[in-house]
Amino acid sequence: MTDKKTTRNTFILVLTAFIWGVAFVAQREGGSETGPYTFIFLRYIIGGTVLLPVIKFLDRAGVSKETVPKTKDDKRLLIKGGICCGACLGVASIFQQVGMYMGTPAGKAGFLTACYIVLVPILGLFIKKKCGLNVWLAVGITLFGLYLLCMNGSFKMQKSDILVLCCSLVFAMHILTIDRFINKNVNGVRMSSIQFYTAAVFGLVPMFFIELHGSFSEIPAMLATAFTGKALISILYAGVMSSGVAYTLQIIGQKDVNPTVASLVMSLESVFSVLAGWAILHERLSARELIGCALIFGAIVLAQLPQKKKA
């Protein structure tokens, strides 16, 4: 039963990576239209809000009733998990969004962000999350595949690149934090909604003081920009699909999956972003990019291979 759950949840994480991959362009364009902090605040407010009717529907349908908090301790654990995950998500999003706003190209940002695949197993060692040799080998192959896929030209680190690299560290912490709480049978959809509202607060404060210049009179102009044209489409996709749907799927999918393997599967985000550009924007794929995609897919298969247990 556990193997079936692991396989099912792995497919859920692949779907998560697909939604994130398609959202990468929307995130970049939306942030440039509204400003990074406004984009973060609006996407997570929308993400948290769209889950509220979902929670009511699931409760009435009796789905996941075993994870609905019943005691004060259950509610306390749920709120703690949501706030901890939301804090990681908020900080990581600020690093990533500001870095891209300052000039880090989408491909380079994808590679730097996906470096969490190396950081997750390293950080996991401190909380006794061990991996087999095949997983460590898969991490190395994936990192090389991501380099071929995302990086073109010289690799020079700018200030904006360092911010995006910092985001990968916090995303690694986010994955391990989710793993800690979801394996305590916390309700995934409720925790996801709480994490979005928490992450929105991290965008709200700098949005008000930096992008709105500390003036409430700037709000109408901000809303007019955010809810028109490309900005509206980007925010809605990032809020509903990338946040409300994908991050909830991540929380559900990580259950019964090793966090390092989960990070490998979710690194498919970079592959899907390139494939989306090919399918939707008719961008050409070079031989180098195709090899990178093939390496990443192969590494994920390698990470799933069962290991012989020592007697």
Image (cartoon, helix red, strand yellow):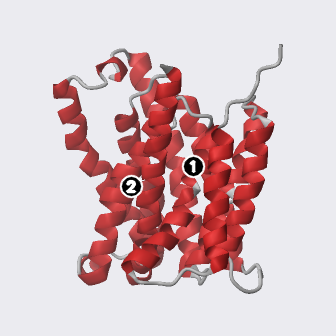
Residue 243 numbered mark, or none? 2
Badge 1, how many Cα within 10 Å: few under 14, some, many 20+?
many
Going by the numbered disc 2, the residue's amino acid type is: Ser
Q: Is residue 240 above or below residue 28?
A: above
Q: CA distance from mark 1 to mark 2?
A: 18 Å
Q: Secondary structure at mark 1?
A: helix
Q: Is residue 186 above or below residue 157?
A: above
Q: Secondary structure at mark 2?
A: helix
Q: Report if the CB atoms under discs 1 and 2 are less than 8 Å apart.
A: no
Q: Nearer the viewer, mark 1 or mark 2?
A: 1
Depth check, front residue: 287 or 113: 287
Which residue is situated farthest in the bottom direction here?
A: 153
Q: Quadrant of residue 179?
A: top right
Going by the numbered disc 1, the residue's amino acid type is: Val
User: Residue 163, percent across and down?
Assistant: 66, 69
Looking at the image, residue 132 sits to the left or right of residue 74; the answer is right
Q: Is residue 113 above or below residue 106?
A: above
Depth check, front residue: 52 or 117: 117
Depth check, front residue: 150 or 206: 150
Looking at the image, residue 303 sits to the left or right of residue 126; the answer is left
Q: Residue at x 55, y 58 (%)?
A: 268
Looking at the image, residue 154 sits to the left or right of residue 24; the answer is right
Residue 43 numbered mark, or none? none
User: Residue 10, percent across and down?
Assistant: 50, 40
Depth check, front residue: 68 or 45: 68
- Residue 281 visible: yes
Residue under label 1: 265
